[in-house]
Image (tube, rainbow, N blue to C red):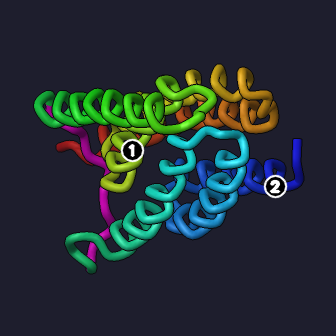
Amino acid sequence: MSPLEVCASLLGLVAVWLTVRQNPWCWPIGLVMVVLYAWLFFQAKLYSNTLLQCVYAALQLYGWWHWTRGERPDERLQVSSLNLRQTASGLALGLLGSAVLGLLMMSYTDASAPWQDATLCAFSLVAQLWMAKKRLQCWALWILLDVLFVVLFIDQALYLTAALYALFTLLACHGWLTWRRELAAARP
């Protein structure tokens, strides 16, 4: 457990807690966290997760803009739900991304867990995009991914990060319940 992992983990906990509370400060704090984790994952030879953190950096900026300005600057972005077609499209994109990235990592790098890392990376991008648009289903996907990340990080001896992702799982459950209540209250 390095000081880098400790700092990134603490920032991650704060960022997800703020996300559940729909506080736009989740995005700049999350930006610092992903930069730190990009370096940590590169050192651990989790290259898909390194790439994921770089994409997350851009998505942190997108989410911050979308939550504070969005399509209608005079209104706060509201929680919404994906329809079946949107959900299926997102999951199909995650599956395709998993296959392509996994093949690349397996063929061209010395990645320590190329397929598992690639799959979690691809589906995390789907979940992050859904979260930036305040889609309720992001939390269900995060719950599944966070559990699988715990397994990966224990395998890689990143125990503090594994503990953080276990907490992320609990926060994602809370996020699901909170956003679902808000969505139900907004319906006529």
Whether 148 is drawn above or below 107: the answer is above
Q: Residue furthest left?
A: 85
Q: Which residues are magenta?
A: 74-83
- Label 2 is placed on what type of residue? Leu
Whether 61 is drawn above or below 138: the answer is below
Could you tell me residue 48's position as x and y percent? 50, 41
Q: Would residue 102 be counted in the magenta stretch?
A: no
Q: Is residue 62 left or right of residue 115?
A: left
Residue occupying image coordinates x 50% and y 67%: 24
Whether 24 is drawn above or below 1: the answer is below
Q: Which residue is mark 1?
A: 125
In the depicted view, which residue is nearer to us: 76 or 144?
144
Residue 4's tag is 2
Residue occupying image coordinates x 68% and y 56%: 39
Q: Residues within 10 Å of mark 1 (few under 14, many from 20)?
A: many
Name the quarter where the C terminus is drawn. Answer: top left
